[in-house]
Image (tube, rainbow, N blue to C red):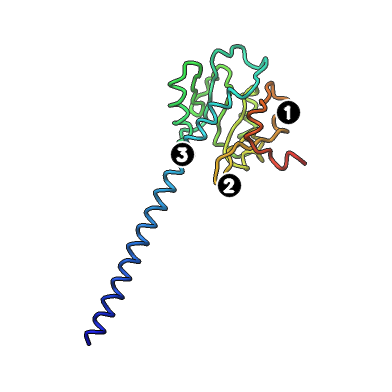
């Protein structure tokens, strides 16, 4: 009889250890997922700020003493971008979702839109701006550049045909870190 109690004790001890290990693993995964979301927003905001410096604006904007960044949503990326811009005298932040007032010459427009009519409306409203969004759906809807996840990293995806006729050009430094949209190559 003592052998069966010992066996039962070992069995419960092993189950308790397995349960504890499973809980620890689940907690670790959820914490890492949350941390990666925060890092993604930070990275996208930094990319957006740097994009203004990696574009040749030519004659599309009157004064390049300040870059104007416009966003159409209040989300993690726009909040991080606003925090970066508040520390930079050469940049101005504009929230365009709730206002009909036209900001003075947006250089970069970051949008959460993914419908073709919404993206077309933004292009018409901001014809001199680089239109940036999230995901391949934004590109398929007519966006110029989007953030995509490739090999577990955030990368800018560019559709060159949507940039045709734009009054600016992308510098080679930006093109070297970006992925060119496959549909654009056809």
Residue at image position (75%, 40%) is 185
In the foreground, 55 or 162: 55
x, y percent for residue 173: 64, 28
In the foreground, 36 or 114: 36
Residue at image position (37%, 54%) is 27
x, y percent for residue 150: 59, 45
Quadrant hosting residue 1? bottom left
x, y percent for residue 50: 55, 26
Q: Earlier in the sequence, mark 1 or mark 3?
A: 3
Mark 1 lies on a secondary structure that is: loop
Which label was assigned to residue 164? 1
Which label was assigned to residue 39? 3
Residue with the most extreme bottom position: 1
Q: CA distance from mark 1 to mark 2?
A: 29 Å
Residue at image position (37%, 62%) is 22
Classify 179 as above or below 21: above
Quadrant hosting residue 83? top left
Q: CA distance from mark 3 to mark 2?
A: 15 Å
Mark 3 lies on a secondary structure that is: helix
Which label was assigned to residue 151? 2
């Amino acid at each position: 009889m003592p052998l069966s109690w010992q066996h039962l004790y070992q069995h419960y001890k092993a189950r308790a250890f397995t349960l504890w290990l499973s809980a620890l693993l689940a907690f670790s995964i959820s914490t890492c997922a949350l941390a990666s979301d925060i890092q993604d927003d930070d990275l996208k905001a930094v990319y957006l700020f740097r994009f203004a410096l990696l574009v040749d604006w030519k004659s599309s904007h009157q004064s390049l003493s300040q870059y104007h960044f416009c966003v159409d949503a209040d989300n993690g990326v726009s909040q991080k971008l606003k925090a970066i811009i508040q520390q930079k005298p050469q940049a101005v932040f504009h929230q365009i979702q709730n206002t009909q007032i036209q900001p003075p010459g947006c250089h970069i427009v970051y949008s959460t839109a993914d419908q073709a009519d919404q993206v077309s409306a933004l292009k018409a409203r901001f014809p001199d701006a680089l239109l940036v969004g999230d995901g391949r759906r934004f590109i398929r809807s007519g966006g110029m550049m989007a953030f995509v996840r490739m090999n577990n990293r955030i990368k800018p995806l560019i559709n060159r045909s949507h940039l045709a006729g734009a009054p600016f050009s992308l510098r080679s430094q930006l093109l070297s870190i970006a992925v060119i949209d496959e549909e654009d190559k056809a």
